[in-house]
Image (cartoon, grey):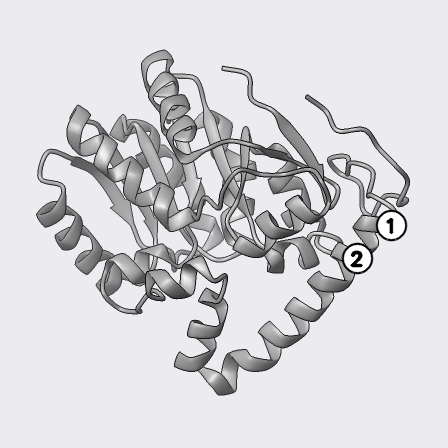
Amino acid sequence: MRTQRQLLFGVYMDAISMEDVINRCRTALVTRNRLLLGVLNAAKVVNLRKDSLLRNSLIECDMLLADGQSVVWASKMLRRPLPERIAGIDIFEQLLMLAHHDARSIYLLGARPDVLARLEENIAQRFPGLRIAGSHHGYFDVTNSEGIAEDIRRSGADMLFLGMTSPKKEIFLGTYGRSLDVPILHGVGGSFDIMAGITRRAPRIWQRAGMEWAYRVLQEPRRLWWRYFSTNATFLALTARELVAPARAFKAGKETPPDHVFSSVRR
């Protein structure tokens, strides 16, 4: 299935609906072809310009989707529209539902051991037809990475979900992703904590208003207020710059941002 792609902030994004995402995942499961899912939000737009590891991990994705409502709004303002927000945690839940219905198996990598245990319990209760082929917490030493990768290979899992922070997630996928023999790979960030019941997700009305970040700030104001204020201000500035001079596509391995010159949208 060919999908339209839009060049935004120097990376190509898939202009696709959630239904189309899940259909492509079904195809990947049948063909056993790798499908690496990635998501982009305002914070990543800001950080990818200076973080080559993050940037290259986004370029490497087989599908790159708008996780943040602000990215969707920016795409429409820039006349390179994305149809809808497709949040990483929503993809996670939809894929768990797919695995439940089709008796597929998953591997969970990330979070603290106690959080991971609660996550497995909750998944087993909500999706009883789903098989957890294996799991490992995210607080492992880099010297154990090869052993964990081998465990994933032996598990025969159909989907791998990584609830790990950057850059550990990107390093692991960059090193082992192509050799794991897992059709669907998806980095879900803090979704493990939410689904385990450790943290709360913003209500739907906050999500639709693009204010999920503000809900997080209200939960941890001292730790998060400056991070979100500075990130959002920089994102607005980058959007204004993108409106005047669209960024040329980044190239994998490139250490510095590309010159801002007009570039046509790839189809």
- Mark 1 lies on residue: 244
Horizontal arrangement in the rendering, residue 236 relative to residue 182 (left or right)? right
**Residue shown at the point (75%, 38%) measured from the top left:** 253
Residue 91 lies in quadrant: top left
Q: Is residue 72 above or below residue 201?
A: above
Horizontal arrangement in the rendering, residue 85 relative to residue 90 (left or right)? right
Q: Quadrant of the C terminus?
A: top right
SS at mark 1 in the image: helix
Query: What's the residue type where badge 2 is placed?
Result: Ala
Q: Is residue 126 above or below residue 3?
A: below
Estimate the x, y position of residue 72 in percent, counting from the top left: 58, 48
**Residue shown at the point (67%, 41%) measured from the top left:** 56
How packed is label 2: few (under 14 Cα within 10 Å), some, or many (20 or more)? some
Horizontal arrangement in the rendering, residue 197 relative to residue 243 (left or right)? left
Estimate the x, y position of residue 184 in percent, counting from the top left: 39, 30
Estimate the x, y position of residue 204 in percent, counting from the top left: 34, 60
Q: Marks 2 and 1: in contact by CB < 8 Å?
A: yes
- Mark 2 lies on residue: 240
* Mark pair 1, 2: CA separation: 7 Å
Query: What's the residue type where badge 1 is placed?
Result: Val
How packed is label 1: few (under 14 Cα within 10 Å), some, or many (20 or more)? few
Name the disc covering residue 217, or none. Answer: none
Horizontal arrangement in the rendering, residue 238 relative to residue 117 (left or right)? right
Estimate the x, y position of residue 90 in percent, counting from the top left: 35, 46
Furthest-bottom residue in view? 222
**Residue shown at the point (37%, 23%) measured from the top left:** 23
SS at mark 2 in the image: helix
